[in-house]
Amino acid sequence: MPIIKNRQYFKKGLSGQGIVALPTMLLIGGLVSSISIALTISVYFYVNSTSGSNLALKAFSASKSGIYDGLMKITRDKSLTTASYNLTVGDQVAAIEICRDTEDCGGSGKFKVTSIGSAFTRRKKMEAIVSVDSTTGVSKLELMREIAL
């Protein structure tokens, strides 16, 4: 058994107060850690959800811009058969494909414009079908829709 030379603490009744402080500090530290971790995770998911919806909207806008660019090319050049190109809109990119007069493109006298817009990790796909009158050259938008990827 160890010899305790200074017995003043035992005589004054202060022997148990230091032991109570350790679990109290551990409990408070654990609570603060748990709250900060929960707050960090919730802020992370909130930021990702809002930035994700912004990126999806930017990808949709890039895809729609690609559709309108394809429609403009068809309107300017009625003899266009097929085309595949990329359009850069700010930081976003739209990959555009134009096909004509096949069954996949909607039939005879019709163009199909497909555009895939991408913004960072988000991608949106749209397609439009345009009919062009062979005698008058009038182009008419028949269908424009978003397609799930």
Image (spheres, rainbow, N blue to C red):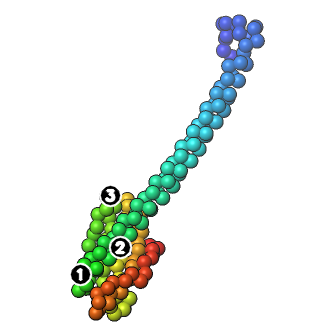
Whether pointer 3 and pointer 2 mark residues with C-beta atoms closer than 8 Å, the reply is no
Q: Name the element at disc 1.
A: loop
115 relative to 80, above or below: above
Residue 74 image position (x, y, % from top left): 28, 80
**Does residue 101 appear left or right of residue 25 in this picture?**
left
Compare residues 31 and 145 and report the one nearer the observer.
145
Residue 3 image position (x, y, % from top left): 67, 11
Foreground tag (3 vs 2):
2
Q: Earlier in the sequence, mark 3 or mark 1?
A: 1
Compare residues 97 and 109 and report the one nearer the observer.
109
Compare residues 69 and 139 and report the one nearer the observer.
139
Which of the 4 image quarters holds residue 117?
A: bottom left
Which residue sits furthest front? 136
Q: Name the element at disc 2.
A: helix
Which residue appears at 76% of the width and 12% of the height?
13
In which quadrant is the N terminus drawn? top right
Q: CA distance from mark 1 to mark 2?
A: 15 Å
Residue 68 image position (x, y, % from top left): 34, 72
9 relative to 112, above or below: above
Q: Which amino acid type corresponds to the residue marked 2 in the rendered image?
A: Ile
Residue position marked by numbered label 1 in the rendering: 77
Residue position marked by numbered label 2 in the rendering: 67
Which of the 4 image quarters holds residue 83?
A: bottom left
Which residue appears at 66% of the width and 32% of the height?
27
Q: Which amino acid type corresponds to the residue marked 1 in the rendered image?
A: Asp
Q: CA distance from mark 3 to mark 2?
A: 17 Å
Which residue appears at 23% of the width and 81% of the height?
77
Residue 91 circle label: 3
